[in-house]
């Protein structure tokens, strides 16, 4: 039987942290400590060393890939003897709840937009494409929020297709983590970026993940480069519980919060509820739908304790 490690060896170059850091070469650090404080997520002890060792080499790699695609566009224009509509380079970032996808996305956006070759970098999360709360309740999907079936995949694919086609303006729905619902009549306007970063739980899924034969396109069909942020499930559950406690003191305390009733919980009660949510929703979703897509990523960022990257896998 083929082992997971042998599959990884066949598919990926593996870098320990110190070896990956060497691939930064002469890329300058353009991020300040103050900016980093605004980019990091809850519960993450992210330092400028992490940016230097992990994200600067990655931004260099992505800059080379984007440049290659831009050159290909010039070749195509020359061949067709006409100027085609520019198509943005699309990067997807997948991974579990609480792994730090959003922080990775924000840091990459900030670093990539400081390269002169592609200054316009937009970031969209797939949370806005979750069905509205009323629809989830009607469909009986509230306890499966985050599972593939809880997303309006038709809307998401139509959005990413229009962006890839170079449409002048494409609107993405926005999401509120306070009301736990799509924001009504509020959108993010995407206007022909050089790069689009799409962050979400299920952005690596393909037709192989559906129980029925389907010919429809998937988000992954439009992606140029995919990243999976990885960590052991024991760490993910711990980080989720820690984040839940922080939400209890922050967003949950707002009267309009969907989870306002959690704001008065004791630490023990909050820990027990967070553990149950993980065991019944987030954990099963990870094991059934998210983690199986891991080996499709072009690059895997493996995290150890304290949210620090300790290994990088780059597809051969």
Image (cartoon, helix red, strand yellow):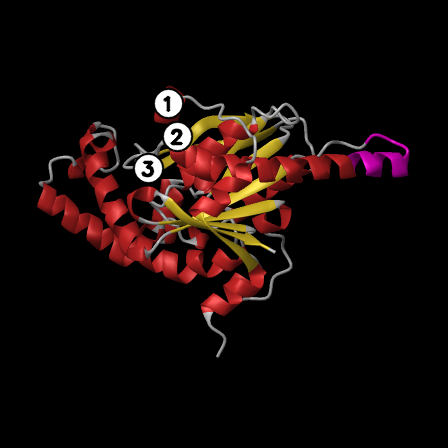
* Magenta-colored stretch includes residue 75: yes
Q: Earlier in the sequence, mark 2 or mark 1?
A: 1
Which disc, if any, is residue 180?
Answer: 3
Asked if disc 2 and disc 1 are in contact, CB closer than 8 Å, the reply is yes
Number of other residues with Cα within 10 Å of mark 1, as a class: few under 14, some 14 to 19, many 20 or more: few
- The residue that label 1 is drawn on is 33
The residue positioned 9% from the left and 46% from the top of the image is 268
Q: Which residues are magenta?
A: 73-83
Helix or strand or loop: what does disc 1 sit on?
A: helix
Residue that carries the numbered disc 2 in the rendered image? 48
Q: Secondary structure at mark 2?
A: helix
How many angstroms separate mark 3 from mark 1 (CA)?
31 Å
Q: Nearer the viewer, residue 68 or 274?
A: 68
Q: Is residue 211 visible?
A: no
Q: Position of residue 229 (x, y in %)?
A: 43, 48
For label 3, the SS is loop
């Amino acid at each position: 039987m083929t082992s997971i490690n042998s599959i990884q060896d066949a598919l990926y170059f593996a870098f320990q942290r110190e070896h990956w850091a060497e691939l930064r070469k002469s890329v300058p650090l353009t991020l300040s400590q103050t900016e980093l404080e605004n980019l990091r997520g809850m519960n993450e002890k992210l330092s400028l060393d992490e940016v230097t060792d992990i994200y600067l080499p990655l931004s260099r790699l992505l800059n080379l890939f984007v440049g290659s695609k831009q050159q290909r566009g010039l070749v195509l224009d020359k061949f067709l003897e006409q100027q085609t509509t520019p198509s943005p380079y699309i990067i997807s970032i997948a991974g579990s709840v609480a792994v730090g996808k959003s922080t990775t996305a924000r840091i990459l956006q900030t670093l990539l937009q400081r390269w002169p070759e592609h200054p316009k970098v937009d970031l969209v999360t797939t949370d806005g494409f979750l069905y509205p709360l009323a629809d989830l309740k009607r469909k009986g999907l509230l306890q499966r929020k985050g599972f593939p079936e809880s997303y309006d995949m038709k809307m998401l694919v139509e959005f990413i297709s229009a962006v890839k086609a170079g449409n002048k303006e494409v609107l993405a729905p926005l999401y509120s983590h306070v009301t736990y619902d799509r924001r009504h009549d509020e959108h993010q306007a995407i206007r022909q970026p050089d790069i689009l970063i799409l962050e979400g739980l299920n952005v690596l899924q393909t037709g192989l993940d559906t129980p029925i034969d389907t010919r429809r396109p998937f988000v992954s069909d439009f992606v140029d480069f995919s990243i999976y942020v990885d960590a052991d499930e024991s760490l993910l559950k711990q980080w989720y519980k820690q984040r839940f406690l922080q939400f209890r003191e922050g967003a949950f305390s707002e009267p309009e919060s969907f989870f306002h009733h959690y704001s008065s919980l004791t630490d023990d009660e909050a820990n027990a509820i967070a553990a149950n949510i993980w065991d019944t929703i987030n954990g099963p979703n990870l094991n059934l739908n998210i983690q199986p897509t891991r080996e499709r990523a072009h690059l895997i960022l493996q995290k150890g304790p304290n949210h620090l990257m300790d290994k990088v896998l780059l597809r051969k």
